[in-house]
Structure formats: C-alpha cells, structure tokens
Image: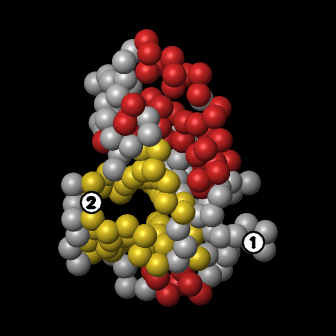
Amino acid sequence: IKRFGPGTLVQVGGQTLIFDAGRGVTQRLLQSGLRLGQVTALFLTHLHSDHVVGIPDLWLTGWLQAAYAGRKTPFKVYGPAGTRELMEGLEKAYDWDIKTRLADQKLPPEGVAVQVTEIEEGVVYEQDGVKVTSFLVDHGDLIKPALGFRIDYGGRSTVISGDTRYSENLIKHATGVDLLIHQVAAA
C-alpha cells in the first residue's frame, strides 16, 4: 500500500515524463509537488492493467482547471501496439464525463484531447535535447511487445527496464548509463 503501482517520473530538460501509469500515479505526482497538468508525455512499457490503471485519473483529473491540474494541451501517450485502442476505449468509457465537464465546467476541449503514438524499437521522442529510445525486452512469450526506455539528455542517460526476464537487449541499452531503474515485482 505504501508503494502503489508502476510509474516512474523523469524530469529532464524542463520536461516531465511519466513511464507507466499504475495505481496511485496521480497521488505520487501531487506528493512530489507537481501539477498533473505539467506532464509532458506518458510512455507505456506494455499494456498490463497494473501499468495502465492510473491513466484515466492522470488524463481526466489533469484536465481539470484547478491548482493541482491545469492541462490545456492534448494528453500525449506513447506506447506499443494496442495503445491507440486502449485510449479510444477510455474515451468511450468516459464520454459522459467528458461531455458533461465540457458543458458544465467549460473546460478547454484541447486539454482532454488524446494524442497517441504507437511505437516500436528506436528513437520515439526528441524534443529540446531530450531523446527517448524504446527497445524490446522479454516479458514472456505472450506479452509482446514489451518495452524498456532509454532517456538521454546533456550527456547523461537513464534506462527504465519495464517488466522483463533476462534480456540481452536490456543489457545492450543499459550498458554505460548513469542510472538503471529495473522494475521488480515480488509476489
């Protein structure tokens, strides 16, 4: 209960990047003193529920025009094949809420818009010197694609493993990084 679900905050080059949105991601952002609307982009390692269950809260609560939220630009999501379908499903599930808030609270429609980029291996994001590269990891025979991410900025680098078994590709991308964040679950 003290750890909540998978989610990693990376603040780099004036950007706020979130990797996975597990249970409690919004609470942890607020505890860090960040507004939910400050999130530049969300990156998903894979689509297991424990890695995406926090998306509706981050997306919709971040859209509210309150001191703790305030997003007025589209919610940007980068993830593996299936991410677009996931987000379209969430848009349908929350259609009533979205329409009601648009009419009743006059929230900016661009703040609830979703921009999905389905990604494969390679550079998936480059902005103001921040580069995010995705690479495949082995999360099991049926869980494909599963991704790890490498973030490079100003001569420094971080790798986030995502859920994986032993992975030569993870070793390759993590070799020489300044920080390796390796997700571990203990049942």
Identify the image quadrant of residue 157. Answer: bottom left
Tell me: residue 138, above or below residue 9.
below
Q: Which residue is mark 2?
A: 12
Residue beneath disc 1? 140
Q: Which residue lies at the image location 62% right of the left edge and 81% below the top edge?
A: 167
Question: What whole-number distance in Å separates the C-alpha atoms at marks 2 and 1?
Answer: 31 Å
Of the 4 image quadrants, the one containing the N terminus is top right
Q: Is residue 75 left or right of residue 130?
A: right
The local secondary structure at tag 2 comes to: strand
Most extreme residue toward the right is 142
Q: Amino acid at mark 1?
A: Gly
Q: Quadrant of the C terminus?
A: bottom right
Q: Is residue 41 left or right of residue 98?
A: left
- Image spot of residue 95 (x, y percent): 59, 28
Residue 75: where, in percent of width, then height?
Answer: 42, 44
* Colour mapping used in the image: secondary structure
Residue 144, image quadrant: bottom right
